[in-house]
Amino acid sequence: MNVTVIGAQWGDEGKGKIVDLYSARADFIVRYQGGNNAGHTLVVEGKKTVLHLIPSGILHPGKTCLIANGVVFDPEVFFKEVATLQAAGVLGSEPWKQIKVSERAHVILDIHRTLDRLREEKASQSKGKIGTTVRGIGPAYEDKAARRGVQVVDLLHPNLLKEKLERTLSEKNALFKNHFGSEEVAYEPVFEKCIMLGEKLRPYIANVRRMLVDAKKAHKPILFEGAQGTLLDVDHGTYPYVTSSNTTAGGVITGCGVGSTFLQSVIGITKAYTTRVGVGPFPSEIEETEKETAEKIRKIGAEFGATTGRMRRVGWLDLVALKYAAEINGFTGLALMKSDVLNGFENIRVCTGYELHGRVLDELPSCIEDMEQLIPVYKTMKCWKNFDTKAVRSRGDLPKELQDFMTVIEKFVDLPIVLLSTGPGREETLQLLDPFQNG
């Protein structure tokens, strides 16, 4: 059975922990979209590890971690992560035996990061700021769509690389000079750096698609690891305040070059509340309406971005958005994270609808102007008190209020909760159903 792990909100749901747990059951762990704008935080035996590009399953020995073609790949970030993992004793002297990078993945260049930064600086003077991580993700995807991108395999073919770099630098320099009033970028240093990185990357480069097809034929379990969250999907998220890739389950198919039969168990990851980093509509946000509660949740839940350190905006659990995510992805189950953060609250709320111009909606509207005017419709519930998370062995051991909360979610979304996280550590987890057996 293959398992896909997808963020059901705006990212930062705790996917890293779930991927780490499920990696113990998989032979291959695959990152299929996004870039190093993602940040997966894992806590193992009290030690914190943050990964931005390499799949979280690397912390398990004997696993093969793959970076697929749908990822925009920054070689410099990759090698820094490899060095960090080697220093921690996770990787040996031949890390390419555990990690492979698709030859078809597109490369993030320095000019992509520069363009990203210049755009955000210019946009900050108006309402046009998207709030990107300034890692060059969007510009790299732009070059890919415009058919002028540099692929990983191009780094090993100097003549082709030269042709592509000349084309993309010509356009970027025109933008840098004439639109942003910035310095132009010289060709030779870019070319030489790419050749150097290509040689260093050579042992890692592979036909990842072929590896996955062969793994499926051999009945080896595969874990697909998504980055960001459903509501940041470029097609189905709160556009234009989204990322530049398909964060949803459909991204597995195009991002790995595999068929729909690879999608078997699809687990949606959601917090017991909701957060969002950066700008964009957030219907159940409580930063203005319940400031003290928002600050309390943020402090207890350490709600700061793993990639940028930015403060996460806080809101109540949005069941309408969660159901929307479930339908788009074809979730077969939910993993409920950070229930411990709400321990001891008097009451909690869940959003069950939106009011817009006097009408109650049961789905996110498509228009960004409408999204920004939504008024949440809430159901208020009694919260659970502190409980010994390490003493929990079954759902029946949970406080009644938490069980009731879980039941409300399951009925609204029409899906089972297959996992409950009660803390950051591996051991602070109640696994209710095995996704590798329950498709």
Image (spheres, rainbow, N blue to C red):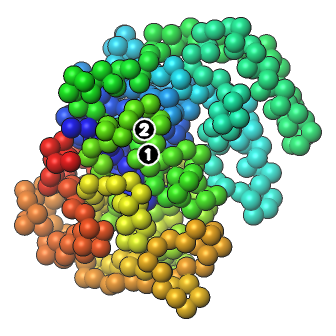
Q: Which amino acid type is marked by label 1?
A: Gly
Please state if 106 lies on the left or on the right of 261 as rendered: right
232 w.r.t. 116: above or below: below
Q: Which amino acid type is marked by label 2?
A: Ile
Task: Locate residue 130, reporting x and y percent.
Answer: 67, 55
Q: Which residue is mark 1?
A: 250
Q: Check if mark 1's residue and mark 2's residue have beta carbons within 8 Å.
A: yes
Between 2 and 47, the one lying in front of the other is 2
Please state if 166 lies on the left or on the right of 90 as rendered: right
Could you tell me which quadrant the N terminus lies in?
Answer: top left
Task: Locate residue 266, reporting x and y percent.
Answer: 30, 48
Q: Which residue is mark 2?
A: 253
Identify the secondary structure beneath mark 2. Answer: helix
Between 432 and 144, the one lying in front of the other is 144
Task: Locate residue 423, reporting x and y percent.
Answer: 25, 55
121 w.r.t. 412: above or below: above
Identify the secondary structure beneath mark 1. Answer: helix
Q: Residue at 16% across / 59% down in the picture?
A: 389
